[in-house]
Amino acid sequence: MRIKEEAITLKDGRNLTLRSPGEKDAQTMLDYVIRTAEETHFLIRYPEEVSMDLEREKKILNDHLEADDSVWFTVFDKDKAVGNCSVSRHRDQIKFRHRCDLAIAIEQAYCGQGLGTMLMTKAIDRARELGFEQMELGVYADNEQAQALYRKMGFQEMGRNIRAFKLKDGTYIDEINMILFL
């Protein structure tokens, strides 16, 4: 599903653009995924695990634009992707259709500027418009900043996956599962 393009201004005065990423953005989206994966261990993959080629990324972007049960909100600083938030149906079976998943990542140079709150507000609003009844996400137990944002937005903890993530150094980190009833 495509969103309407809009200009946004961060707390520090930087002017950015919020829009759906398209096929022409495939390279910047791949670069963004690698950059954010390099900055922190809070994402699901390491930078070297980003193995999608440009044609595959174009297809993924096009599929999301055409889907009626998912939406991507991507923030661009000129032509560079710096933040992304997505809402997607949890599963397509009838018993799961009331549930959606939320994913969000912001390049660290753009954190602390209200961008996370803005992206999540838009994602929650769109999830309601799409008819979802609950939004779910998983967060690293040591990502206190993200947990604070999610709680501010109304999410509550619904459980933990113990030792869900194992880092390269052998460290285990729990995943906190959170839910927002829409």
Image: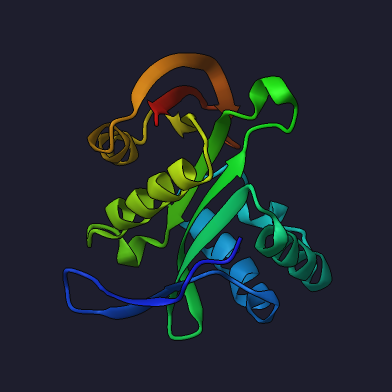
Is residue 178 placed above or below 60 in the rendered structure?
Answer: above
Q: Position of residue 84 (x, y in %)?
A: 48, 59
Query: Splitting the image into 4 quarters, where does residue 25 fall?
Result: bottom right
Which quarter of the rendered picture does the N terminus lie within? bottom right
* Camera-side residue of 19 and 26: 19
Query: Splitting the image into 4 quarters, where does residue 15 fall?
Result: bottom left
Q: Could you tell whether 110 is left or right of 133 in the image?
A: left
Q: Is residue 54 visible?
A: yes
* Camera-side residue of 24 and 20: 20
Q: Position of residue 118 (x, y in %)?
A: 30, 57
Could you tell me which residue is drawn at 57 percent across and 22 percent down? 164
Is residue 99 placed above or below 122 in the rendered structure?
Answer: above
* Camera-side residue of 50 and 12: 12
Q: Could you tell whether 55 is left or right of 144 in the image?
A: right
Could you tell me which residue is drawn at 29 percent across and 34 percent down? 144
Could you tell me which residue is drawn at 53 percent across and 16 percent down? 161
Is residue 146 placed above or below 51 in the rendered structure?
Answer: above
Q: How is the image coloured?
A: rainbow
* Camera-side residue of 182 and 136: 182
Q: Position of residue 59 (x, y in %)?
A: 79, 65
Q: Position of residue 53 (x, y in %)?
A: 80, 67
Could you tell me which residue is drawn at 36 percent across and 60 percent down? 108
- Residue, far bottom: 78
